[in-house]
Amino acid sequence: MPIKILIVEDEPKLRKLMRDYFSKEGFSSIESDNGKDALEKFENLQPDIIILDIMLPELDGWTVMKRIRDTSNIPVIMLTARSEEEDKLFGYELGADDYITKPFSLKVLIAKVKALLKRSGKIKIEENAISIDALKLDLASHRALLNGKDLELSPKEYDLLSLLIQNKETAFSRDELLNKVWGYDYFGDARTVDTTVKRLRSKLEDYSHMIETVRGYGYRLSNRKKD
């Protein structure tokens, strides 16, 4: 199952940048733009790590951090637009695991996330790979394997499978898939998605049921057992 990151940031562009970058690295993102909503998503969706901005509507990052630490030792990286030592010391006193100051490198943020996840001992990361049952996606080599054997996928078949497996249990409409995989400037229609899914299912053989049809909407990937 992909690692879930709760991104708590009220700047939409920065939040999207982080989400897209984490997705490329094989993580699944949960987004929140205010402190109150962040606490609700933390309690209900059980993320594996939290990226927490300090300056937030509703409840600030300090308050959110304190309430999280009342019940959980989940790894938390705090984001701040200031580099004052006092801010960092206060965050560490509240239980933050690490800090990053805006503007920051997304590569550095990813490195901090991976280091914390490894250090926590709760989550085991296989670098650049995601496995669900017999299906494995190797992001570094751009390969998909089933029971250890290469699936001979076209570039778009791989991109579609990569999007679905990195967002397991998330339902995408056909138009969303068309835009995310083929791009906004593609002139085809939603039938392209259906055709590609059909080819993917054929190659997945006994695991074709993992790509589920969401009637009247689109598709999602799940590892629910075959009926």
Image: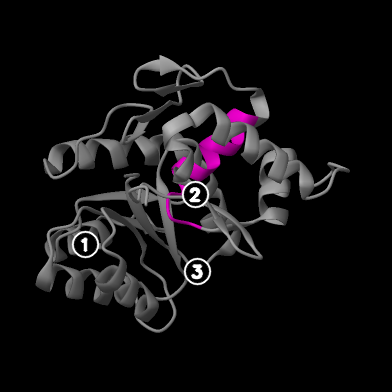
Crowding near pointer 1: few (<14 within 10 Å), some, many (20+)?
many
Labels 2 and 1: the sequence-earlier one: 2
In the rendered image, residue 115 lying in the magenta stretch gets the answer no
Name the foreground residue: 142 vs 8.
142
- What type is the residue that disc 3 sits on? Asp
- What type is the residue that disc 1 sits on? Gly
- Magenta-tinted stretch: 157-170
Query: Mark 1 highlights which residue?
Result: 91
* Residue 18 badge: 2
Magenta segment, principal secondary structure?
Answer: helix
Instruction: Residue at 65%, 24% (x, y): give it.
Output: 155
Q: CA distance from mark 3 to mark 2?
A: 12 Å
Instruction: Residue at 14%, 68% (x, y): give it.
Output: 69
- The image position of residue 212, as x and y in percent, is 51, 51
- What type is the residue that disc 2 sits on? Met
* Residue 10 badge: 3
Labels 1 and 3: the sequence-earlier one: 3
Instruction: Residue at 29%, 50% (x, y): give it.
Output: 99
Please tell me whether mark 3 or mark 2 is closer to you in this view: 2
Q: Secondary structure beneath disc 2?
A: helix
Name the foreground residue: 86 vs 171.
171
Q: Secondary structure beneath disc 3?
A: loop
Residue 71 as seen in the image, left or right of residue 182: left
